[in-house]
């Protein structure tokens, strides 16, 4: 089985800009979670990147990730009516350098 990645784009409400980084640092690592990065892409925009042992690890961690999202949802701005407050994607790693 190959490594698996997830990337989540989101926008933080200005009053929570300083809080969101500490909230991500508090996230308890689920089984199969190899590493995570929080990338600031703009003044209030971020991408969370996670690397997993495999797709099954990511699937098994979804309840924990949804719980985490629910705990910070009030800190995030809606991206669009279709997406809500996050724009998540995931897939297998097909090349590494």
Image (spheres, helix red, strand yellow):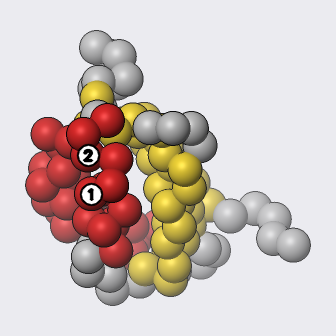
Asked if the residue at tag 1 contacts the one at tag 2, i.e. Cβ–Cβ closer than 8 Å, the answer is yes
Q: Is residue 23 left or right of residue 9?
A: left
Q: Residue at x 47, y 56 (%)?
A: 48
Please tell me in which quadrant of the rendered image residue 68 appears. bottom left
Circle on res. 32: none
Please give the count of numbered marks on the rendered protein: 2
**Quadrant location of the C terminus in the rendered image:** bottom right
> Where is residue 26 shown, x and y percent of the image?
26, 76
Say whether residue 54 is visible. no
Height in image: 84 above or below 20? Answer: above
Residue with the most extreme top position: 81
Return the x and y of residue 58 as percentages of the image width and height: 39, 67
Quadrant the N terminus occupies: bottom right
**Label 1: few (<14), some (14–19) or many (≥20) C-alpha neighbours in 10 Å:** few
Q: Which residue is mark 1?
A: 19
Spot occupied by residue 13 in the image (x, y as percentages of width and height): 29, 34
Q: Residue at horizontal 39%, vertical 35%?
A: 11
Q: Going by the image, does 43 lie left or right of 80?
A: right
Residue 81 against residue 42 in the figure, above or below = above
Q: Quadrant of residue 4?
A: bottom right
Query: 78 or 97: nearer the eye?
Result: 78
Numbered circle sitting on residue 16: 2
């Amino acid at each position: 089985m190959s490594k698996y990645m997830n990337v989540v784009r989101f926008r933080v409400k200005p009053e929570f800009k300083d809080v969101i980084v500490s909230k991500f640092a508090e996230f308890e690592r689920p089984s199969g979670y190899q590493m995570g990065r929080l990338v600031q892409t703009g003044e209030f925009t971020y991408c969370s990147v996670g690397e997993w042992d495999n797709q099954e690890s990511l699937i098994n961690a979804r309840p924990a990730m949804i719980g985490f999202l629910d705990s910070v949802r009030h800190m995030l701005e809606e991206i669009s009516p279709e997406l809500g407050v996050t724009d998540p994607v995931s897939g297998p790693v097909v090349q590494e350098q």
